[in-house]
Amino acid sequence: MAQRIRHLTEGLGQARDLDVQILSVQSFARTARDDWRAGLLAILKGLLARRRRLQEKVLGDLDDLESSGELKRMRRAMRKIAVGPRKERRIAASPPVRRQMARSLLDLLEELLSYESYVRRPGCVDELHRMRIAASASAILSRCLIRPTDPV
């Protein structure tokens, strides 16, 4: 799971870098000298083509993450940690920090998926940046929270 999210995060980071480059070239092209404009438009065309290819990869990574069933297993495991199994609740609840981490991870996974509609929209730099942050935080938190013995 963490590896899939890390892979997705890398793609999102590359997409964000391209988005910033695209916006910068577009901005510069609007005020550039006429004799530079054709060259800038060629650069922009190349950046947009790379961004389209990367969009497909990121969308594929999101689909793989969702279709793998790992998200469902992760949610189940995090809910179990967040509230503690019924049997264990009477004896000893999960440590409060671990419960809060599980709740946070559930929230981050939902947030990550909520940004999927922005992947095809390079102009939504802020949303894509927040998606990358959610993916990165999910990967980090899942590595901290999930023990090798946890059923995921």
Image: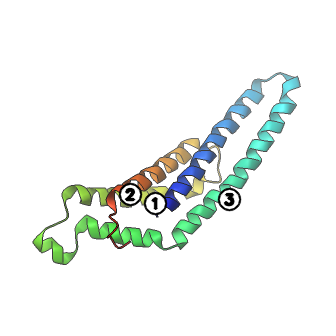
In the foreground, 90 or 107: 90
x then y, percent, for residue 121: 64, 50
Q: Earlier in the sequence, mark 2 or mark 1?
A: 1
Q: Which of the labelled discs sits on residue 141, or is there none? A: none
**Picture quarter containing residue 47?**
top right
Closer to the camera in the image, 117 or 58: 58
Q: Is residue 100 visible?
A: yes
Residue 144 point in image, percent of width and height? 34, 55
**Amino acid type of the residue that numbered disc 1 sits on in the rendered structure:** Ala
The residue most toward the left is: 91
- Of the residues shown, which amino acid type is indicated by label 3? Glu
Q: How far apart, in angstroms, are the residues tagged by discs 3 and 2?
A: 27 Å
Q: Residue at x 60, y 43 (%)?
A: 16
Q: Which residue is mark 1?
A: 2
Rendered position, 102 above or below 20: below
Residue type indicated by callout 2: Arg
Looking at the rendered structure, the secondary structure element under dot 2 is: helix
What is the number of the mark on residue 143?
2
